[in-house]
Image (tube, coloured by chain):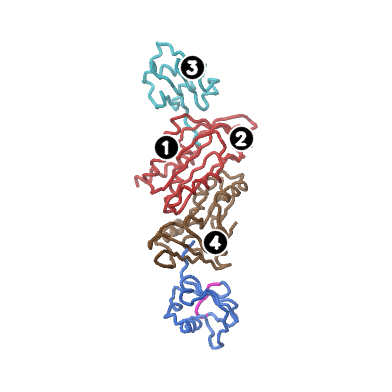
Chain colours: A brown, B red, C blue, D cyan
Amino acid sequence: MLRISAEPIDAGRELKQFESRATSAGGIVTFSGQVRPHAKQGPVDTLFLQAYAPMTETGIESAMAEARTRWDLESILVLHRIGEMHPGDTIVFVATAARHRRAAFEAADFLMDYLKTEAVFWKKEETATGAHWIEPRDDDYADAARWTKKETV
Amino acid sequence: MLRISAEPIDAGRELKQFESRATSAGGIVTFSGQVRPHAKQGPVDTLFLQAYAPMTETGIESAMAEARTRWDLESILVLHRIGEMHPGDTIVFVATAARHRRAAFEAADFLMDYLKTEAVFWKKEETATGAHWIEPRDDDYADAARWTKKETV
Amino acid sequence: MQKILYFGRLSDVTGTSEEMLNIPPEIETAGALREWLDLRFDASGALLDPTVRIAINSEITFDTAPVSNAAEIAFMPPVGGG
Amino acid sequence: MQKILYFGRLSDVTGTSEEMLNIPPEIETAGALREWLDLRFDASGALLDPTVRIAINSEITFDTAPVSNAAEIAFMPPVGGG
């Protein structure tokens, strides 16, 4: 399931609901990403995230479908917030349920790499010194590349 | 933080609390493990888990300390249930918070491998055909071995 | 009237993230539209940057794509991830 | 009186997971205690299995360790993990 919304994400409540649906799985992995209080330019005031419907959804749904072909998963949940956020707010919540914990870990990791590098979002950070748009870090590209390497090695 | 207890684990509530403490981290990874409804011997009625205090605690605390030396973590939480449980009940809940999501993923994965293979617990499954004690699966040993390999390669 | 979207840093240049526009009939392709809009906004090439991709009706396309029947045309700088 | 603990499958053999015991003075080492208890419970070697480790006061030890001053002695089959 995928939901992109400007509403706040309550990770605890989402995990509880996900857990109640994924009753035959052995393990659940979640990732929640929060707005960091500090940027290179100083303390963050606001983070603004922009999506392009339905392209953003289509891309994430493809990554979710790919995760399902790569790993034996019982269920997947991706929640992504858009619009204005503040430090500590949850931007993204990913949950994967699988009989084997390795599958749940790897699928959550894979989905986060997609979301952090390839997902169709534009991101603006506002600090005391002004606003600026952010592009992916080199780290993020390296993380995402791990999954293609695996196929060819 | 480590807690071993016969009280039920509410993963959603634990994540919420963990999140509120880990405010300067960028990401949180959690793993929750549930009692599976089916065993090789058929539907599971009861799972019984036995620990040996303080040896069980000491071992898990060492693994937590090792995770902190290997990865740059802001906080770690390990909750483990003991005593009698039923299918769907949460046995274990691990949460890691870090500025970089790779650290949070790897540390949670590492802690689960420790908990599933080396942690001092004895485990008895009761099905319609009787009760039997469980020893680690070969998979679990292979998972745990990944971390030692990394050091030597 | 056609809907034009400017995402990410482009909206700082254009001053808007969305507008309804009558594209002149002589602007036949996505590439020609880029150039026309870049001049119109005095964008100093921000819209011409090859990393800025163009989507027509939510499909990424090439500069040679015709724009006359496009309901929605989006200018997309590199995505920043979530 | 000394506390003896039998973990995991061993409690099925001994019928208890914990007991208070006066260990006879001639049983001086952990290894001798294994043998004496195995006979006492008619355990057919369950306590002699080399995968069963012995802990004295919460520290894993060897069969040669003295038991006379041990407050707590635990017999531990391979752990099953959580």
Q: Would you call the spot at circle 3 few (<14 residues within 10 Å), some (14-19), or many (20 or more)?
A: few
Chain of the residue where label 2 is placed in the rendered structure = B
Measure how far apart labels 4 and 2 are at the Cα level: 39 Å
Taking the image as shown, residue A7 lies to the left or right of residue B106, namely right
**SS type, badge 1:** helix
Decide which of tag 2 and tag 1 comes sooner along the chain.
2
Tell me, for residue A60, which label it has, or none.
Answer: 4
Q: Position of residue A88 (x, y in %)?
A: 48, 55
Chain of the residue where label 1 is placed in the rendered structure = B
Measure how far apart labels 2 and 1 are at the Cα level: 34 Å
Answer whether residue A13 is visible to the viewer in this image.
yes
Mark 2 or 3: the one toward you = 3
Q: Amino acid at mark 3?
A: Met
Mark 2 or 1: the one toward you = 1
Question: Are labels 4 and 2 assigned to the same chain?
Answer: no
Q: Which residue is mark 3?
A: D20
Q: Which residue is mark 2?
A: B41
- Residue drawn at (44%, 30%) of the image: B54
Chain of the residue where label 3 is placed in the rendered structure = D
Would residue C42 be counted in the magenta stretch?
no
Measure how far apart labels 4 and 1 are at the Cα level: 38 Å
Question: Are labels 4 and 3 assigned to the same chain?
Answer: no
- Residue drawn at (43%, 11%) of the image: D24
Q: Amino acid at mark 2?
A: Gln
Q: Which residue is mark 1?
A: B61
Q: Residue furthest front?
A: A128
Mark 4 or 3: the one toward you = 3
Is C47 located above or below residue D44 in the figure?
below
